Image: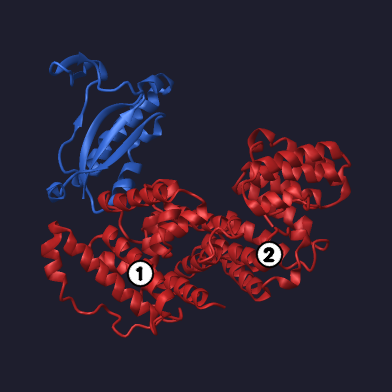
Amino acid sequence: VTPIQSADGLLARTLREESGLLVARLARQFHDFDLAEEAVQTAVSEALEAWRRDGAPDNPAAWLQTAARHNALDLVRRRSRQVALAMRLAPAPEPDGASYDVPDGSTDGGRTDDRLALLFACCHPALAPEARLALTLRAVVGMTTPQIARAFLVNERTLAQRIVRAKRKIVTAGIALTVPADDVLAERLSDVLAVVALMYNEGFVSSDGATQDRDLAGDAVWLAGVVATSLPGEAEAWGLAALLTFQHARAAARFSEDGDLVLLPDQDRSRWDHAAIAAGEAMLERAAALHAPGPFQLRAAIAACHATSPSWAETDWLQIVTLFEVLTRHDPSPVVRLNRAVAMSQIGPHEVAPSLAAVDELADHLDGYHLFHATRAELLTRLGRDDEAAAANARALSLTTNDAERRLLATRLHRHPLTDGS
Amino acid sequence: MKYVLMFTSRPDLNASVDPELGQAVYKKVYEWFQENGEKFADSGAELLGIETATTIKHGDDGPVVVDGPFNEAKEIVGGFSVIDVPDMDAAVALVKTWPQLELPGVAVEIRPMVEDYSQFE
């Protein structure tokens, strides 16, 4: 481990824990979310530079807090219209954490509420959908704009403008940094969970090297856990936390040493994180105890079937098909129906042809989706229709943009259907 | 915070609305304004139809007076209100109860009002 990597690892963990809280706290103190977020973002960039140069400080959280506060005051002073406010704030006493330690998560003291309120604001339905994830990554998780741009392979300037627009809207449109009232909590929570799920997916597909200094998928698992523990009565929050925990538990087995994708059937199950899988099962039990089933819980239950099966061959396909049936009632989207058909084809050889027919029915919706064609190729191969399979493979290859997936399809390594993404 | 609510509709879709439903919704609109009276910062206005609109436009040789609304959009603004509520969530919660949202083509735009003119100094 080089010093750079270790400083980055520590910084990444510190940022994940601290930056959202700092943004929330400074936003309250300065009555300006935009300024608070800018101050923390600058502190993050300063930390990246200083820690790589000088090594990590003894108390990284306090270092970051001091830097962010300094930046906030600096920003206030530079905005001439706020001179009066700066004068009032300059001699302000140290905030509530003068002796400030990196938290271990056991003592809370309103910290998760702060972070949760910020998260709800960043995922507000009044913000453009494409801006919500970017803003969440910056404000809540403490990623820098260049890191986000690298992770999503988007132009940094465009991304920065999108974030600035969303931040300004939070301030000017009066989007409050609060956890929504009970009567709209469920609806707003689904927006938040969608952003966290998207964050995991982005981290998952870009995990072959787009961004080495932040573990986006790991950050998403962590954030899903924060949301669930902060709102312990919300079954779907536990469902998402469980789902991402199961998916992430398989991360080590998902790529070969050469960076090639290894699909679920071929994965070395001894490399799965079995402690994480047990944690996922506990989360799923908490969700089930709340008796409010939903799509994330059903997906988590399907992931649990895979995660707890000793091998691909011994997977409980009947159970998975049943879960997909129920999931289709919550979410009748073509992708869910595609996955149900794939699971059905695993029940036995006589199910392959009907599964292909079910897949073909989705052509109108999924013709532009590479996994639709990859699935067709797989089923056609099993039916011995090799020419058609080759054509479907070529189509899948032409549609995928992720390098690892391209290599997988190009080398025709996928001997099994892409059941649940891996 | 003060917000302007702009109530819009699509007259081209009016024919598809069951007249009884239209009547019922109109009655609920009246009740809605009564129930939420304390949230309104002024009386607002309900507007006559776009066939009554006159627009004054920029012209190279000075202002030009023309018949009709300022844009050709299908949506027309039927009225506006100014509300004073704590935050965006309160504005959204109020607007979601706007009775006419039962009718196809109806939309309400929420725009924060400029209250702090120092930002333009």
Labels 1 and 2 in the same subunit: yes
* Chain under disc 1: A
Whether residue A146 sits left or right of residue B33 in the image: it is right
Task: Give the numbered dot on residue A304.
Answer: 2
Residue A292 or A115: which is nearer the viewer? A115
**Could you tell me which residue is drawn at 15 percent across and 66 percent down?**
A86
Q: Which chain is displayed in blue in the rendered image?
A: B
Residue A317 or A413: which is nearer the viewer? A413
Location of residue B18 in the rendering, given as x and y in whole percent from the top left corner: 42, 23
Relative to B108, is A307 above or below?
Answer: below
**Could you tell me which residue is drawn at 26 percent across and 41 percent down?**
B111
Relative to A11, is A196 above or below?
Answer: above
Instruction: Locate the N terminus of chain A by quadrant.
Output: bottom right
- Distance between the alpha carbons at the discs numbered 1 and 2: 42 Å
Asked if residue A392 shows in the view, the reply is yes
Please tell me whether mark 1 sits on a helix, a strand or a loop. Answer: helix
Give the residue type that dot 2 points to. Answer: Ala
The residue that mark 1 highlights is: A46
